[in-house]
Image (spheres, grey):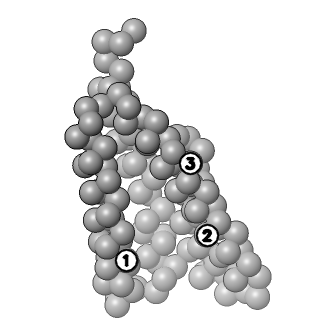
């Protein structure tokens, strides 16, 4: 989980920094940071799937519905923000989100493992 949060934070902050740097290497740095974001998604999804075994089966359906909604809502939110902000500012605004994701995960982890020890 910490790896996922770190990779996501680096991805968002790195993509935002490439917009501020305005250098020729920015494209390549942005590509590397986007790859970090992809790795974070892969590790995060497999972690969540393994974690959901501790919850009722309905949770898997809710998680699947949530990922479907996120696939639509995320790009729409990005497009709405891009009307008013440059792309680097959108990613800079997203940089603190991994801390919120981490807090939610650790709360749910505590709930799932309560009484198991």
Q: How far apart are marks 2 and 3 (CA)?
A: 14 Å
| Disc 1: which residue | 75
Q: In this view, does 54 lie to the left or right of 47?
A: left
Q: In which quarter of the image is residue 38?
A: bottom right
What x and y, as percent, mark residue 67? 34, 59
Q: Distance between the residues labelled 1 and 3?
A: 21 Å
Identify the mark at residue 103; answer none if there is no mark. Answer: none
| Disc 2: which residue | 34
What x and y, as percent, mark residue 77? 32, 76
Label 3: how many Cα within 10 Å (few below 14, some 14–19, many 20+)? some
Could you say which is closer to the camera, residue 47 or residue 17? 47
| Disc 3: which residue | 43
- The label nearer to you, 2 versus 3, is 3
Label 2: how many Cα within 10 Å (few below 14, some 14–19, many 20+)? some
Residue at horizontal 74 percent and vertical 78 percent from the top:
28
What x and y, as percent, mark residue 4? 55, 48
Which part of the image, by quadrant, shows the C terminus?
A: top left
Residue at horizontal 29 percent and vertical 26 percent from the top:
111
**Viewer can see residue 10:** no
Q: In this view, does 68 lie to the left or right of 42?
A: left
Q: Which residue lies furthest to the right in this view?
A: 25
Note whether 38 is above or below 6 in the view shown.
Answer: below
What x and y, as percent, mark residue 8? 54, 57
SS under mark 1? helix
Residue at horizontal 25 percent and vertical 49 percent from the top:
62
Q: How far apart are marks 2 and 1 (CA)?
A: 15 Å
């Amino acid at each position: 989980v910490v790896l996922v949060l770190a990779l996501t934070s680096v991805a968002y902050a790195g993509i935002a920094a490439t917009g501020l740097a305005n250098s020729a290497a920015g494209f390549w740095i942005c590509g590397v940071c986007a790859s970090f974001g992809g790795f974070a998604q892969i590790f995060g999804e497999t972690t969540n799937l393994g974690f959901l075994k501790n919850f009722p089966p309905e949770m898997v359906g809710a998680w699947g519905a949530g990922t479907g909604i996120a696939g639509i809502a995320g790009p729409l939110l990005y497009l709405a923000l891009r009307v008013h902000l440059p792309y680097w500012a959108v990613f800079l605004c997203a940089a603190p989100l991994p801390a919120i994701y981490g807090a939610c995960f650790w709360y749910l982890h505590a709930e799932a493992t309560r009484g198991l020890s």
